[in-house]
Image (cartoon, coloured by chain):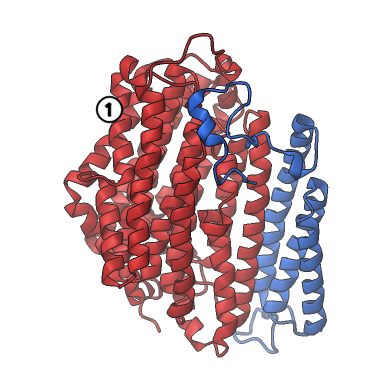
Chain colours: A blue, B red
Amino acid sequence: METLLSVICGFMVAASLYLMLSGNLIRFIFGLVLATNAVNLLIFVAGRLSQTHPPLIDPDAVIPAQSLANALPQALILTAIVIGFALLTFVFILFYRAFQALDTVETELMRVSEPRQGRDAEEGGQAGVAGIHGPGGEGA
Amino acid sequence: MNWLVVLPVIVPFAMAAVTLCLRNHLRLQGRAAISGALVHFVVCMFLLARVAKTGIVTVQIGSWPAPFGITLAADHFSAILVAVTGILGLSVTAYSRAEIRVGMLAAGYQPLLHILIGGVCGAFLTGDLFNLYVWFEVMLMASFGLLVMGGEKQQLDGGVKYVMINLFATLLFISGIGLLYGMTGTLNMADLHFAVQQVEHKGLLTAVAALFMTAFGIKAGIFPLFFWLPVSYHTPPVDVSTIMAGLLTKVGVYALIRMFTLVFIFDIAYTHGILLAAGVLTMIVGVLGTAAFYEFRRILSFHIISQVGYMVLGLALFTPLALTGAVFFLVHNMIVKANLFLISGVCRQKAGSFDLGRLGGLYKNHGFITILFFISAFSLAGFPPLSGFWAKFLVIRAGLEAKAYVAAAAAIVVGLLTTYSMTKIWAEAFWKPAPAAESVPEPELDKQGPGQSDFWLYAPIVVLVMLTLAMGLLPGPFVNLAGSAAHELMNPGIYVEAVLGGGR
């Protein structure tokens, strides 16, 4: 079971990387969803899978009668899911706003904050010319 | 329960709540924000004094003993950084009184700012890996909000890239946490110090260490992973760039230093070797990037990268002196870098642009800000007797002592190149005559609220400049503090004992 889940995790991460690297905001979101779930599964597997009882002890017992499940990975995943949802919502809205403002979902075409020429073309101040063709202009 | 450790986190969150309630009363909100920042600053200073006096202070939340419960621990390293956070929080809040737009205030600038500060303090103080992740998220959410607040095209563009890469880093981070938990069964950092040594397959651990290194490296902006930083840091209003430049990358550096002095110290030759290479390349590439740009804040953004390189170098050399240098450098850089961003804001307000081509004549017309810039820039470039000199001196000397001659040489050369790029700003913005009046002012300027008073504009800058001067002229106490921090970092036993109470 753990092997199967590990393989599934691997495939999910591979697929999400493919989507995230494709340079399209919509695909990035799907990649993000896949990746978050893959990570959650990973924590689940890392915390050992076992057929045990829920971590509850009888009121009069001090030591649990049978082996119990580890509650910590579940708590971690729960937190991660909540945070993941919050981030996902934010990303949805941000990308929508970016689409409205920039009129594209292709990251290759988003160059507003880093125009290809060091500064705006319309002002050809002598001082600025030297700075146009420098290293580091290829951000993003 | 030791409240002093918890307060640097609680106060900003309380202030966030208060300022959120006051969002319809902007005048009152401004006052509440500044007094809240003042209280936070005082609390942070008390914490630093307490730690300097009695050593590491820890709190077990809910009285659950250490490896099981949530731990907050303030050693010298954390306390120093929390104190600087307090200073920066206060400075930026004060600066916002003169600079921020009314629209931003109404959109919730103050609550987000305080959440950001609280998140940063939480990340510095937590002693638990998963909580570090949560604090990273708190901080990131606030920074996302601040970064795109106002919704200019540029901001959204920079914001998209910032969000994408940071989310990816977060995913790497939490995968690392999951794998580490699977191998060791604990998430308490002090407990991990022992648990890691008992893992049989050290190769797997090194892989996890690489995951953490990449995740924190993205946050810190080290060499191959820094591209998001100069894309985004020059887009938001200057207050936001300041707080992000001063604090956010430094949290990444903090996490790197914490994890690679406390937990991942089983294969120093390998992990710290990578860090050494990354640190040197970060310094060089960052400073070369500054040569390419003619925008005030973009130059400063590339400087952040090159200076993160020095800190990583200090960590990678892994000697007491090098770590002293790294800690000192962190403090110096947080203060000076934030200050330069604030100064760029003043220049924008006085002369109308961030673009060096449009700026000019500031020396003639605004002599005071020129002096302030001069001191900060020289401090950043590492001229004696300013704080940057001592910071660089410590790191370079540690490099020479550790026989890392290439790294030391690179550090010196990068210092010189920093001077070059600062000269560029100096010559363009301050020295050359103001450009002809025909150049149209940037349209966004019109939406700016009236600069109510120059007092709030200058006061934080003057205070931060005084601090650099103090660190430069009287380095003794600061170096001693950094030295105690380095001593604790080099001997993780002290931290572990303080957190676990010697129970192991």
Tell me: B481 left or right of B26. Answer: left
Q: Is residue B7 visible?
A: yes
Q: Position of residue A51 (x, y in %)?
A: 78, 85
Q: Could you say which is closer to the camera, residue B205 or residue B295?
A: B295
Q: At x 52% / y 21%, what residue is drawn?
A: B26
The correct choice, above or below, for B325 with respect to B189 in the image is above
The correct choice, above or below, for B502 with respect to A135 in the image is below
Please tell me how crowded label 1 is: few (under 14), some (14-19), or many (20+) other residues with Cα within 10 Å.
Answer: few
Quadrant of the rendering where the C terminus of chain B is positioned: bottom left
Q: Position of residue A15 (x, y in %)?
A: 82, 64
Q: At x 52% / y 22%, what residue is drawn?
A: A125
Quadrant of the rendering where the N terminus of chain B is positioned: bottom left
User: Residue B407's quadrant in the figure?
Assistant: bottom left
Q: In terms of secondary structure, where does tag 1 sit?
A: helix
The correct choice, above or below, for A91 with respect to B170 in the image is above
Q: Is residue B13 visible?
A: no
Q: At x 69% / y 83%, what residue is drawn?
A: A68
Q: Could you say which is closer to the camera, residue B317 or residue B215?
A: B317
Q: Position of residue A35 (x, y in %)?
A: 75, 62
> Chain letter of disc 1?
B
User: Residue A5's quadrant in the figure?
Assistant: bottom right
Q: Amino acid at mark 1?
A: Ile
Tell me: B394 left or right of A91. Answer: left
Q: Could you say which is closer to the camera, residue A6 or residue B501?
A: A6
Tell me: B154 left or right of B34. Answer: right
The residue indicated by pointer 1 is B371
Q: Position of residue B218 (x, y in %)?
A: 57, 57
